[in-house]
Amino acid sequence: MNLIPLQAIELAKKRLENIIYHNPLSYAPKLSQISKAQVFLKKENLQLTGSFKIRGAFNKLASLHEEKKLDGGVIAASAGNHAQGVAYSASHFKVKSVVVMPEATPLLKVQSTRNLGAEVMLKGTNYDEAYAYALKLAKEQNYTFIHPFADKEVAAGQGTIALEMMGEQDLDIILVPVGGGGLISGIASAYRLLKPDVKIIGVSAKGARAMFESFHAKRIIKTEAVKTIADGIAVRDVNEGIFECIKQGVDDMVEVDDEEIASAILYLIESQKLVVEGAGAVGIAALLHNKLDLHPHQKVGVVVSGGNIDVTMLNLIIEKGLIKTNRKTKFRMTLIDKPGSLMKLTDLLTKMDANIVHVSYDRISTKLEYGDAYISITLETKGLEHKEQICKTLLEHGYKFSEIV
């Protein structure tokens, strides 16, 4: 597949009028200061259904509707965002939609897809197995399969993001999350055809390196497995057509690991007041962790692709992030098991303005001497200096402890 024709992207824009939200680029002053460039965010996490995927899914179904090819219903395989885009679009056109999701898909994503009108089937231990089952069912039941990225109409829909960005800022660099490549192929096509001097840079997750490795090798590289918190871009195989489009339209690709993605998610919550999923945070992670050589005069657009993050994962990221930034600390120590020992410790911690959020008291471990007890204690602290002062004071009062990290 070559670059997506500009006519197809402009037609997609017309189809999406009065359907999607137009979230304007917003300047991010704090992020600009950190990255030493002028940073603007395209907040597709605030989009209808919580991600950019509604654009491609709706455009595809609209094209099928115009060709009168929707009567038999549609089917898709997805772990979340594409599923919701297809479900919403099918409901709009009043046709049946079936979505096959991996069995381990979080309940919230399953329920959200059902609430949008789709019949959800849980099949397979991963996306590839769900995808294979969906293709099989499409053939048996005569459904039209809606591919999440390897489709010209889907990619054209995603390319409408570029048209919106062009109308608002003269950007020098665009950072785009990369998984299967539908989003970046659409955006890159629009910019290559209208503003070819703009640099398009893909950002992939280190745990899903198929497109990253293929891009730099200039040939398709197969990967055996993917493992990343950025589940929206956790794609194992590279589609040949999309890859050809990316080779023509994308200037470079960088990658970020899960720790960097998690730090970006936490940063966006605290500094930008945005809830963003792993895939949506990779561009921010690239800026925060200096993956690019930027200059103060450059204008950088970052596509924040989605915000459908599982609450359990979000909680884990926040808790680990607080520990890494020394705002939460866990200690383990041995106390004499007698009345008042625990109170003496908690009184000391209170005087140091440490907020105790959890205490675990163990007096029956076989590793303990008789008369002793293990205590694990979790504290809210005010940063590294405060934590170090707590450690110093505990040592001065004779407490021997280890930090749990």
Image (cartoon, rainbow, N blue to C red):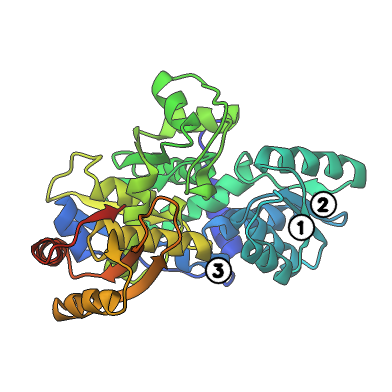
The picture places residue 42, in percent across and down from the top left corner, at: 38, 60
- Kindly report the distance in space between the C-alpha atoms of the residues bearing marks 3 and 2: 25 Å
* Residue 379 falls in image quadrant: bottom left
What amino acid is at disc 2? Lys
Q: Do the residues labelled 1 and 2 touch (CB within 8 Å)?
A: yes
Position of 273 with respect to 178 (left or right) is: left
Please give the label number shown on residue 48.
3
Answer with mark 3 or mark 2, whichever residue precedes in sequence: 3
Indicate which label's residue lies in the foreground, 3 or 2. Answer: 3
The residue labelled by disc 1 is: 65
Q: Which of 380 and 112 is in front in this view?
A: 380
The answer to which of 330 and 202 lies nearer the viewer is 330
| 72 horizontally vs 56: left or right | right
Q: Give amino acid for label 3.
A: Leu
Residue closer to the observer: 351 or 190: 351
For residue 69, the mark is 2
Q: In which quarter of the image is residue 182?
A: top right
Q: What element does badge 2 sit on?
A: loop
- Is the residue 365 above or below the residue 114 in the image? above
Q: How crowded is mark 3: few (under 14 residues within 10 Å), some or many (20 or more)?
A: some
User: Which numbered disc flags the more N-terminal residue, 3 or 1?
Assistant: 3
Give the alpha-carbon distance from disc 1 to disc 2, as whole Å.
6 Å
Give me the residue at 49% from left, 19% from top. 219
Q: Is the residue marked by circle 1 packed among few (<14), some (14-19), or many (20+) residues within 10 Å?
A: some
Residue at 48% in and 43% down: 228
- Amino acid type, residue under disc 1 in the picture: His
Q: For residue 225, what is the image quadrant?
A: top right
